[in-house]
Image: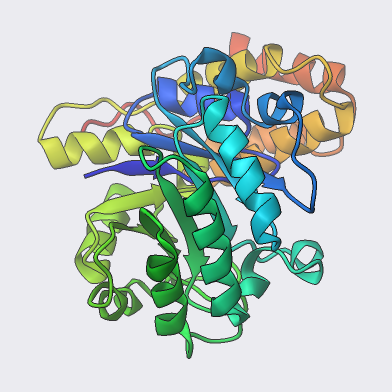
Amino acid sequence: MKLVLAPMEGVVDFKMRELLTDLGGFDLCVTEFIRVVDLTFPRRVFTRYCPELLNGGYTRAGTPVRVQLLGQVPHALAANARKAVKLGSHGVDLNFGCPAKTVNKSRGGAVLLKEPEQIYQIIKAVRDAVPEEHQVSAKIRLGFDDDANSTEIVDAVQQGGASSLAIHARTKRDGYKPPAYWEKIPPLLSRLTIPVVANGEIWQVEDALLCQTRSQCQDLMLGRGALATPDLAAKIKAHVNGTHYTSLTWENVVYHILHSSMHQDENMSEKYFSARTKQWLSYLKRQYSGAHVLFDEIKTLKSKDDVMKVLQKYAMSPDLDSNHNSEV
């Protein structure tokens, strides 16, 4: 079983990847997407999105990191993919699943699910450009408005030469509304010989096991669930391996939030820092009652200093949580 940390724009950045992989369980991380138009980016752009390239393409914990590209121009994506692996990325991932309207309007992300032929051309160009020892993976949804052309999409991915495929078991129209339709993946598996990773609506260990059963995929991609429960990957691996595991308490989580916040990039804007912290807390509220109280204290704050003062206060006395250590 392999667990992949999903790319999530605006929250799963370098520091979040570092934090989550330190907690264990992940076998691979995929970066936030780099939007490609027609230029080959300089080294500094790749290292900004993926500082792990300065460490051989690994997180501090030793988890390999893969650069994700998004765009619609095959030759431009190919050139940037070739540069990414040359700089140390562990393969390249291609984004055909982003549902954001601003991205789709510029013919990027999930809108390409309407064009399986273009998906094929992109993957083929990238595969031809990248040395064969490097993987070229793709991330898709079941379709755009519906899943009527899902077989055409996966055929295009495989025929283009992708090494593996992550399937978010919802359409673009579905967005992130539950449920995820894991049961729609097996009919697609019968057409594929490449590894498939199931993604969508995995919040707990039980969800992971159910997803494996319904999707018939052993490998999973975790996104929002890992933000809500930072040690979710470690808990899943412990359960599968039958090993003892003590879950993070809210006190542990507050420490990690504070530590991550204290070591953010100096160039990060105050607006981004504040929004990112609030977004993470909005996910943590699903699992930790203490996150509700902390979120309420910072939700109107805008400056980094003000947010940090509240975090430091909670780190000194985080006595708000009803979720104590639990064992797996």
Residue 256: x, y in percent?
Answer: 54, 19
> Can residue 70 be seen in this snapshot?
no
Q: Residue 316 occupies which quadrant of the picture?
A: top right
Viewer can see residue 173: yes
**Is 196 situated above or below 296?**
below
Image quarter for residue 132?
A: top left
Query: Residue 39, located in which quarter of the rendered image?
Result: top right
Residue shown at 28% from the left, 51% from the top: 219
Residue 24's spot in the image, x, y percent? 34, 26
In the displayed structure, 116 sits above or below 162; it is below
- Is 140 rendered above or below residue 270? below
What quarter of the picture does the N terminus occupy? top left
Question: Going 26% across and 41% down the picture, which residue do you hit?
Answer: 236
The front one of 104 and 204 is 104
Identify the colour scheme used. Answer: rainbow
Foreground pick, 171 / 242: 171
Q: Position of residue 17 (x, y in %)?
A: 53, 29
Residue at position x 24%, y 70% from top?
A: 214
Lateral position of residue 211 relative to residue 231, left or right: left
List x then y, in percent, for residue 323: 41, 34
Q: Residue furthest top?
A: 316
User: How many numbered discs, if any?
Assistant: 0
- Locate the C terminus by quadrant: top left
